[in-house]
Protein backbone atom coordinates (compact mmCIF):
# COMPACT_ATOMS: atom_id res chain seq x y z
CA UNK A 1 0.00 0.00 0.00
CA UNK A 2 1.26 3.44 -0.96
CA UNK A 3 -0.25 6.92 -0.72
CA UNK A 4 -1.90 6.81 -4.19
CA UNK A 5 -3.85 3.71 -3.00
CA UNK A 6 -5.62 5.66 -0.24
CA UNK A 7 -8.78 6.61 -2.12
CA UNK A 8 -9.53 3.02 -3.12
CA UNK A 9 -8.60 1.69 0.32
CA UNK A 10 -10.80 4.27 2.05
CA UNK A 11 -13.69 3.29 -0.21
CA UNK A 12 -13.32 -0.36 0.80
CA UNK A 13 -13.01 0.65 4.46
CA UNK A 14 -16.24 2.70 4.32
CA UNK A 15 -18.32 -0.15 2.87
CA UNK A 16 -16.77 -2.78 5.14
CA UNK A 17 -16.99 -1.44 8.68
CA UNK A 18 -19.50 0.18 11.02
CA UNK A 19 -16.64 2.17 12.57
CA UNK A 20 -14.29 2.79 9.61
CA UNK A 21 -10.79 4.09 10.08
CA UNK A 22 -10.24 7.70 9.06
CA UNK A 23 -7.96 8.96 6.31
CA UNK A 24 -5.65 10.23 9.06
CA UNK A 25 -5.43 6.76 10.58
CA UNK A 26 -4.37 5.30 7.23
CA UNK A 27 -1.83 8.08 6.70
CA UNK A 28 -0.34 7.29 10.12
CA UNK A 29 -0.06 3.61 9.18
CA UNK A 30 1.75 4.49 5.97
CA UNK A 31 4.50 6.28 7.90
CA UNK A 32 4.99 3.80 10.77
CA UNK A 33 8.26 1.93 10.49
CA UNK A 34 6.74 -1.27 11.94
CA UNK A 35 3.58 -1.27 9.81
CA UNK A 36 3.17 -3.89 7.10
CA UNK A 37 0.62 -2.72 4.53
CA UNK A 38 -0.35 -4.70 1.46
CA UNK A 39 -3.06 -4.41 -1.18
CA UNK A 40 -4.52 -7.04 -3.47
CA UNK A 41 -5.15 -5.89 -7.02
CA UNK A 42 -7.40 -7.41 -9.62
CA UNK A 43 -6.70 -5.79 -12.93
CA UNK A 44 -6.26 -2.12 -12.17
CA UNK A 45 -8.56 -2.18 -9.10
CA UNK A 46 -7.61 -2.57 -5.48
CA UNK A 47 -9.73 -5.47 -4.26
CA UNK A 48 -8.58 -5.60 -0.64
CA UNK A 49 -5.91 -4.71 1.87
CA UNK A 50 -4.28 -5.77 5.10
CA UNK A 51 -2.56 -3.68 7.75
CA UNK A 52 -0.38 -5.42 10.29
CA UNK A 53 2.25 -4.40 12.81
CA UNK A 54 5.48 -6.36 13.11
CA UNK A 55 6.99 -5.89 16.55
CA UNK A 56 9.87 -8.21 17.39
CA UNK A 57 8.47 -11.69 16.61
CA UNK A 58 4.77 -10.76 16.78
CA UNK A 59 2.57 -9.85 13.86
CA UNK A 60 -0.58 -8.04 14.97
CA UNK A 61 -3.18 -7.95 12.21
CA UNK A 62 -4.90 -4.61 12.70
CA UNK A 63 -7.20 -4.34 9.69
CA UNK A 64 -8.25 -6.55 6.79
CA UNK A 65 -10.96 -5.81 4.25
CA UNK A 66 -12.03 -6.89 0.79
CA UNK A 67 -14.35 -4.93 -1.46
CA UNK A 68 -17.83 -6.57 -1.55
CA UNK A 69 -17.50 -7.24 -5.31
CA UNK A 70 -14.44 -9.42 -4.65
CA UNK A 71 -15.40 -11.27 -1.47
CA UNK A 72 -15.46 -15.07 -1.18
CA UNK A 73 -12.52 -15.46 -3.56
CA UNK A 74 -9.81 -16.12 -0.97
CA UNK A 75 -8.34 -12.62 -1.20
CA UNK A 76 -8.29 -11.97 2.56
CA UNK A 77 -6.69 -15.38 3.15
CA UNK A 78 -3.95 -14.66 0.61
CA UNK A 79 -3.29 -11.22 2.09
CA UNK A 80 -2.88 -12.69 5.57
CA UNK A 81 -0.70 -15.55 4.36
CA UNK A 82 1.43 -13.04 2.46
CA UNK A 83 2.18 -10.89 5.52
CA UNK A 84 2.78 -13.99 7.67
CA UNK A 85 5.37 -15.26 5.20
CA UNK A 86 7.21 -11.98 4.72
CA UNK A 87 9.49 -12.10 7.75
CA UNK A 88 11.13 -15.20 9.23
CA UNK A 89 11.16 -13.59 12.70
CA UNK A 90 7.38 -13.98 13.03
CA UNK A 91 6.62 -16.61 15.66
CA UNK A 92 3.04 -15.71 16.38
CA UNK A 93 0.24 -13.54 15.09
CA UNK A 94 -2.77 -12.08 16.81
CA UNK A 95 -5.90 -10.14 16.01
CA UNK A 96 -9.32 -9.11 17.26
CA UNK A 97 -12.49 -10.01 15.38
CA UNK A 98 -16.13 -9.23 16.12
CA UNK A 99 -17.91 -11.99 17.98
CA UNK A 100 -20.74 -11.80 15.42
CA UNK A 101 -18.48 -12.06 12.36
CA UNK A 102 -18.80 -15.80 11.89
CA UNK A 103 -17.37 -15.77 8.36
CA UNK A 104 -14.16 -14.02 9.43
CA UNK A 105 -13.78 -16.23 12.49
CA UNK A 106 -14.15 -19.33 10.30
CA UNK A 107 -11.56 -18.00 7.84
CA UNK A 108 -9.07 -17.34 10.64
CA UNK A 109 -9.65 -20.81 12.10
CA UNK A 110 -9.05 -22.28 8.63
CA UNK A 111 -5.68 -20.50 8.62
CA UNK A 112 -4.82 -22.04 11.99
CA UNK A 113 -5.77 -19.23 14.36
CA UNK A 114 -7.23 -20.26 17.71
CA UNK A 115 -9.74 -18.28 19.77
CA UNK A 116 -7.76 -17.38 22.87
CA UNK A 117 -9.73 -14.68 24.68
CA UNK A 118 -12.41 -12.01 24.68
CA UNK A 119 -12.27 -8.23 24.90
CA UNK A 120 -15.68 -7.37 26.26
CA UNK A 121 -17.51 -4.48 24.58
CA UNK A 122 -14.41 -3.77 22.46
CA UNK A 123 -16.50 -2.32 19.64
CA UNK A 124 -17.91 0.60 21.57
CA UNK A 125 -20.62 1.81 19.19
CA UNK A 126 -22.53 -1.48 19.38
CA UNK A 127 -21.00 -2.79 22.61
CA UNK A 128 -19.98 -5.97 20.77
CA UNK A 129 -17.23 -8.20 22.12
CA UNK A 130 -14.02 -8.90 20.23
CA UNK A 131 -12.69 -12.43 20.07
CA UNK A 132 -8.91 -12.60 20.39
CA UNK A 133 -7.36 -15.04 17.95
CA UNK A 134 -3.78 -16.26 17.96
CA UNK A 135 -1.66 -18.22 15.52
CA UNK A 136 1.62 -19.81 16.62
CA UNK A 137 3.82 -19.91 13.54
CA UNK A 138 6.60 -21.96 15.14
CA UNK A 139 5.31 -25.56 15.19
CA UNK A 140 7.34 -26.11 18.36
CA UNK A 141 5.03 -23.76 20.25
CA UNK A 142 1.75 -25.21 19.02
CA UNK A 143 1.23 -28.61 17.50
CA UNK A 144 -1.53 -27.72 15.05
CA UNK A 145 0.17 -25.18 12.81
CA UNK A 146 2.65 -27.38 11.03
CA UNK A 147 1.88 -25.90 7.61
CA UNK A 148 3.33 -22.45 8.30
Image (tube, grey):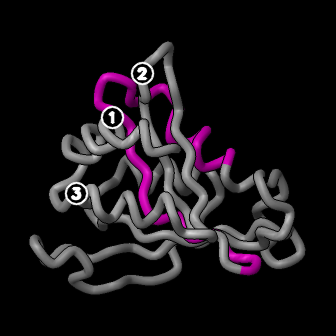
The CA distance from mark 3 to mark 2 is 20 Å
Q: Position of residue 78 (x, y in %)?
A: 61, 38
Q: Is residue 29 shown in magenta? A: no
Is 49 on the left or on the right of 135, as rendered?
A: left
Q: Residue 114: tell me if it is visible.
A: no
Q: Which mark is residue 90?
A: none
User: Residue 84's image quarter?
Assistant: bottom right
The CA distance from mark 1 to mark 3 is 14 Å
Asked if marks 1 and 3 touch (Cβ < 8 Å), the reply is no
The CA distance from mark 1 to mark 2 is 8 Å
Q: Position of residue 108 (x, y in %)?
A: 53, 55
The residue carrying mark 3 is 20
Q: Which mark is residue 45?
A: 2
Q: Residue 93: tell me if it is visible.
A: yes
Circle 3: element type: loop
Is 102 on the left or on the right of 136, as rendered?
A: left
Q: Residues within 10 Å of mark 3 (few under 14, many from 20)?
A: some
Is residue 66 depicted above or below 41 in this figure?
A: below
User: Residue 141's image quarter?
Assistant: bottom right
Give the residue displayed 27% in from the left and 86% down from the top.
Answer: 120
User: Over which residues does the magenta segment extend?
Assistant: 56-82
Is 129 on the left or on the right of 140, as rendered?
A: left
Asked if marks 1 and 2 touch (Cβ < 8 Å), the reply is yes
Circle 1: element type: helix
The residue carrying mark 1 is 8
Q: Position of residue 7 (x, y in %)?
A: 30, 38
Foreground of the two, 9 or 16: 9
Mark toward the start of the polypeptide (1 vs 3): 1
Amino acid sequence: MVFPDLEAVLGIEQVSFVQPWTRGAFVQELIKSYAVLRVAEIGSRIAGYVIAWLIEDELHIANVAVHPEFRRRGIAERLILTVLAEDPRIRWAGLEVRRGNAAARAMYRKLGFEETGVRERYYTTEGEDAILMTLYVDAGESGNNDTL
